[in-house]
Image (cartoon, grey):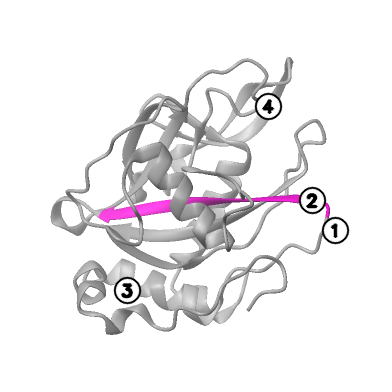
Amino acid sequence: MSPRGGEPSTGRPEGRPAARRLLAPPTLAHLAHSLIERPGSVADVGPDVRRAAVALVLRAGFDDRLELLFIERAVYPGDPWSGQVAFPGGRRELLDHSLRETAVRETREELGFDIEDDGLILGRLDELPPLTPVLPPIVVRPYVAVVDADVSLALSDEVARAFWAPVDELCSPDASVNASVIVRGESRVVPCVSHAGYTIWGMTERIFRDFQRRLEPDASSGRR
């Protein structure tokens, strides 16, 4: 068990009948292998730093084309992540036994489905702290999951909209841009992923880049 809010190993998920069906696309099978061979690292921070978890939810679309689920957060005054494109997730609560449980609960609350009951958690990516000093000091642990292509979404009031984006389009060099964004009233030029009018930046962009590296052929070797 991890010393900082971890959970017991889930073993190799491909042994379960439902898992074999969900992992039939070769890209998903490769990704699952990478996450098993090299689980995400745990950030070396003090015990007073709050922790959160997000879920990168995948599905196999038409012709097994991999798609990744994003949300656009509803606008709330005083929320530093208000209105941003993000992965479903949030802070760990006292009743969460692990950060994995946080990712499951938050996805269920925000989108109305369960990434364990309606799919399969493949593993976790590296934990990330925020780089912007004006943002709250929260370390985020990303989990990667796959669900059936026909999973239904029921958006909560915290989510303005949700959309599936083809992974190959997100990984295209043409999607990587620098864009001006507003952070706590200040304009900054930051690296982004641009897709269908949406701008993916900040912590979400950093998490996506780690995910993107896991899709590379040598991802399980530990090379970065």
**Left or right relative to 68: residue 54:** right
Majority secondary structure of magenta residues? strand
Q: What label sits on residue 49 in the rendered view?
A: 2
In terms of image quadrants, where is residue 177?
top right
Query: What type is the residue that disc 4 sits on?
Result: Val
**Mark 1 lies on residue:** 46
**Left or right relative to 198: residue 114:** left
Q: How far apart are marks 2 and 1 (CA)?
A: 6 Å
**Mark 3 lies on residue:** 29
Q: Distance between the residues labelled 3 and 2?
A: 34 Å
For label 3, the SS is: helix
Query: What type is the residue that disc 2 sits on?
Result: Val
Q: Distance between the residues labelled 4 and 3?
A: 36 Å
Q: Compared with residue 211, is residue 87 higher up or lower down, i.e. above or below?
A: above
Residue extending furthest toward the left = 63
Around disc 2, counting alpha carbons within 10 Å, would you say few (fewer than 14), some (14 to 19), or many (20 or more)?
Answer: few
